[in-house]
Amino acid sequence: MSMVFRNARAKINNALVAELALPWLEEFGPKGPVDSETLSVAVNQNQASACAGAKEAKVYLQSAALEFMGSINTRAIEMARADMQKAIDAIVGDHDQ
C-alpha cells in the first residue's frame, strides 16, 4: 500500500469520526463553563502522579477543564471540520493525479 494511499485513508477515517462527532458537538456540546453535574472530566496524571500534591492538583485540573469546556468544545468543532476538509482535499488531490 503506497504512503499516499495510507495518508488519504487515515484522513478519510478521521473524517468519518468527525462526521459523527460534529452534530453532537454542535447541538449538545457545552457553550460555556459547566458544573460537574452536567459533565464529568477525568484527568489522568501520567507524570509525577505519586508525588506529593498530585491528588490535590488533579482536583484543580478537573475544575479548570469544566470552566473552559465551552472553549474546548469550540476547538473540538474546529478540529472536526478541519479533519473533514483534509479528507475532501485528499480525495480531490488523489483524483487529480
Image (cartoon, rainbow, N blue to C red):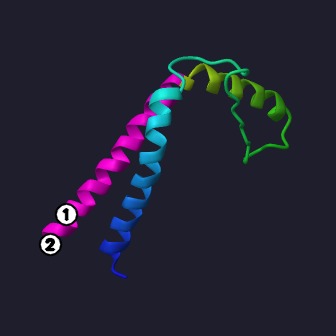
Question: Which residues make up the magenta segment?
Answer: 70-97
- As drawn, the residue found furthest toward the bottom would be 1
Residue at position x 72%, y 36% from top? 42
Residue at position x 38%, y 36% from top? 78
Q: Which residue type carries mark 2? A: Gln
Left or right of 58 in this view: 6: left
The image shows residue 60, relative to residue 15, as above or below, that is: above
Q: Which residue is mark 2?
A: 97
Residue 90 picture location, percent across and down: 26, 61
Q: Secondary structure at mark 1?
A: helix
Q: Quadrant of the C terminus?
A: bottom left
Based on the picture, tell me whether residue 81 belongs to the magenta stretch.
yes
Residue 19 picture location, percent across and down: 41, 47
Label 2 with label 1: CB-CB less than 8 Å: yes
Q: Which residue type carries mark 1? A: Gly
Left or right of 53 in this view: 86: left
CA distance for labels 2 and 1: 7 Å
Q: Which residue is mark 1?
A: 93
For the residue pair 26 and 58, the one nearer the viewer reads as 26
Question: Which quadrant holds residue 74?
Answer: top left
Q: Quadrant of the N terminus?
A: bottom left
- Mark 1 Cα-neighbour bin, 10 Å: few <14, some 14–19, many ≥20: few
